[in-house]
Image: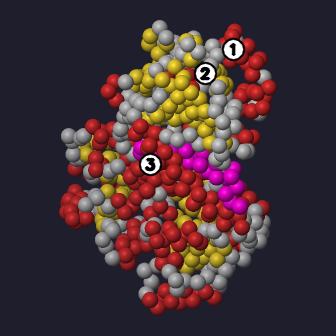
Amino acid sequence: MEKSTVPGVKSILIVSINPYFLDRENFWFEENIKQILEARKNQTFFQDNTIYVDVEKSPAFAKASAGKQKIKLSEFLRKIDEMGYEKVQKVSEPGEFSRQGGIIDIFPLNINCAVRIEFFGNSIENMEKLPIIIENEKEIKERIKNKLKRQKIYSQLGTLKPGDYLVHLDHGVGIYRGRTSQGGPTSNDSNDYYTLEYAQNDKLYVPIGLERKLSRYVGFSEPKISRLSSPVWINTKRKIKEETEKLAKELLEIYAQREISTRPYYIEDTEIDALLASTFVHEETPDQIQAMEEIKKDLEEKEEPMDRIVCGDVGFGKTEIALRTIIKAVNSGYQSALICPTTILASQHCQTFQKRIGDLPIKVELLSRLQSKREQKQIIQNIKDGKTDIVIGTHRLLSNDVNFKNLGLLVIDDEQRFGVRQKEKLKKIRTSLDVLSLSATPIPRTLYLAMSSLKDISIIQTPPAQRLPIKTLVKPWSKEIIKKAIQEEISRNGQVYYLHNRVETIETAKKLLEDLLPKVKFGIIHGKMEEKNLIKIMDDFTNKKIGVLIATTIIENGLDLPNVNTLIAANAAKLGLSQAYQIRGRIGRSHIQAFAYFLHGGNLSELAKERLRALKEAEELGSGYRIAMKDLELRGAGNILGKEQSGNINHVGLNLYCQMLSDAIEKLKAYDYNK
């Protein structure tokens, strides 16, 4: 874009934003203006997709009077809206228009500069070119083509039902009220308009074929319905566009630094890799295999450091992918680190790795507050000397006294659960290291598309073979139900999680259960316990010395315990949908049928009923991707983009936000921001 002084104009042709016109250079319109105007007389395509404005002569768009073109302002605005132009606060590039009273600024697709059209009543008083021009016409038109494709992808209008919230690109959030034909409401396929209801009972009719201006609203809470013709939406969209451009710039900076950094190619798989794979007790799923192939390609065929995120439902094999990647790094001569948000998770990972690695000549150590100062000092020295191949720990690994001899790979488990300072350190580290991030929260498809041009993402949706859906029962709290559920699980030599999410009364809950089942061994864990005591109880539970573990939501993030196949949530109405879903994923990790009891005290709110109903309906494996539209995917978006972006998502909906982010990324890349 460049500013310059340009003369006024007496007539202009405005063409719609569609592929036919995007494929033509601007001089084509100048050369063929007579033929286009002739075609407008009897060809529907040109009548629907062009406007010809002539201040002095009789117009081809409307009747003339006293030398001035007679056009209703409302009709003109409706026409350019239907031609695909986006309403903005200030015009800056082709395909946009803005309105201030009777003044319309528009940047036609077929002209190299923006134009101001001044209305007085139903007459056009004046037109002039604005000092906003474009230099690289071909590049911008290519970007608009890509934007059209993205708009179609991001709209997600399948299975649309009356009452759903929709976001119109120019007018904001409204309520979908069905389809309408010119003759009135109808249900057949010849409908002409989507009907949206806005505040104060205003209606907006969006022509079929202009779906790309609509997107399904997905947000963290109920949206505020917009008012038609209010400047609030345009201002909101402008502010969020600025925020997405900042985020895109930040992402591109990391991307650019990674592009500059190089490292030797990793070696191809060795006998150790094959041996490790052969000891995996499960059959790899197609998604696991694909993720591992993508990682191998990153490491063996690319010189720039890997930065890949593996997203998947709970229990779908992300840890196995991490283990094999770590071993591959060790075989290539690098040290590897796995950083976890909690001590308990780090301890469990360390036990799993040591068990899987067995007698292989690879040294695995744990670094956390569980060790004494003396033990920590020795482990840190081993890391510095290169005696430790794999270190697993909490953010203790990010301390200044921890120095690696040859760190090549960093695996981050649930990065969203780290604090701001830790994330800043991780951000700096990831520009020079190979980084593999694991996310237990499914990533929204729209966010995946927005980020895929910058971040490498592998999604695991296929459940492991022989895995059975968890039978989910939603019932009023009852001693009889609890007693029977525990007895049935213990009788088949299984174990139970009993979720009681109040530390103050957790001992009382234990006493009640001991009175019900005096022969069963119970244990308690919660976040306020000393970590060594907590780890000891978890070890006892893992080694089956405890039959029922009474716990708070501390169990939300953990590892495979295939012997635990009953969950009893004592006050399920207090759980959020995603939290309940994650906790349910702690059981059913084998071929044995698992049971989840979500108990409540009756008199549920409508919201609690809806959450529990959604949980019950989502029994099938991998259904985190279905109920995610309600909660899980939103949480995933918030986690990956950061909490500061959650408010922006709430204002415009996840789909439009991701589209705006995708547009910002492409725009910056097109302007060679990296260079």
Label 1, secondary structure: give it: helix
Counting every numbered tag in the picture gives 3
The amino acid type, in three-letter code, at marker 3 is Asn
Task: Give residue 266's position: percent from left, percent from top.
Answer: 75, 69
Position above or below: 411 against 596: below
The reply to whether the magenta stretch includes residue 652 is yes
Please tell me in which quadrant of the rendered image residue 45 appears: top right
Q: Which mark is residue 648?
A: 3
The amino acid type, in three-letter code, at marker 2 is Val
Asked whether, in this view, residue 494 is left or right of residue 297, the answer is: left
Residue drawn at (50%, 63%) of the image: 415
Confirm or deny contact between disc 3 and disc 1 (CB under 8 A).
Answer: no
Task: Give residue 587's position: percent from left, percent from top.
Answer: 43, 54
Q: Which mark is residue 55?
A: 2
Q: Nearer the viewer, residue 434 or 561?
A: 434
Q: Nearer the viewer, residue 669 or 563?
A: 669
Please tell me in which quadrant of the rendered image residue 279 appears: bottom right
Q: Is residue 402 visible?
A: yes
Q: Which mark is residue 40?
A: 1
Q: Earlier in the sequence, mark 3 or mark 1?
A: 1
Q: Nearer the viewer, residue 186 or 406?
A: 186
Asked whether, in this view, residue 517 is left or right of residue 224, the answer is: left
